[in-house]
Image (cartoon, rainbow, N blue to C red):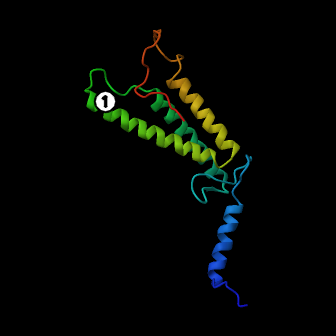
Amino acid sequence: MASMNHSSGSEMHNMDHNHTNMAMMHMTFFWGSNAQILFSGWPGTRAGMYALALIFVFVLSVLVEWLSNGQLIKPGASNVKAGLVQTLMHAIRVGLAYIVMLAIMSFNVGILLVAVAGHAIGFLLFGSRVFKHSEMPPYVKTSDLPPMSC
């Protein structure tokens, strides 16, 4: 019986190449700067680019906490304007949180550690009482957005 495989050599090469890229993805946590984070080929094998990726994820995590605990809407703003600002802030916060989650899914321990550190530092700066100037009465709304829920 004749072979049913009608693929050209270049198609088979592309399939092999794609399979090789898939095999390089880690499915367990690992240490090291040779990782793929968010984009194909980024940060690559250079230590400087890996450090940039760590800083990027750290800053995104801090921004998520800033948006979660910030008060950008001024008292007395109209409900429509305040609602639109809240919706925009919520969309940005969720988008950034998903980007951090996808970065962590690279299974790189360095990325996980800087994401947790970014959230912790962000909460310390913007959500905790450490840098508040006065006593906070109980049940006072401290941010424009409700807490994140997964």
- In front: 128, or 8? 8
Residue located at (52% from left, 16% from top): 129
- Residue at the extreme bottom of the image, as rendered: 2
Between 48 and 107, the one nearer to me in the picture:
107
Position of residue 2 in the picture relative to residue 138 (left or right)? right
- SS for dot 1: helix
- Which residue is more in the foreground, 115 or 140? 140
Asked if residue 56 lies left or right of residue 138, the reply is right
Q: Residue at x 53, y 43 (%)?
A: 98
Q: Residue at x 40, y 36 (%)?
A: 89
From the top left corner, tell me how far across and down residue 71 is, in percent: 39, 25
Residue visible at 70% across and 54% down?
A: 34
Q: Would you identify the image quadrant in which residue 8 lies?
A: bottom right
Q: Which residue is mark 1?
A: 82
Specify the amino acid type for callout 1: Ala
Say whether residue 42 is left or right of residue 79: right
- Image location of residue 111, percent across then percent down: 64, 43
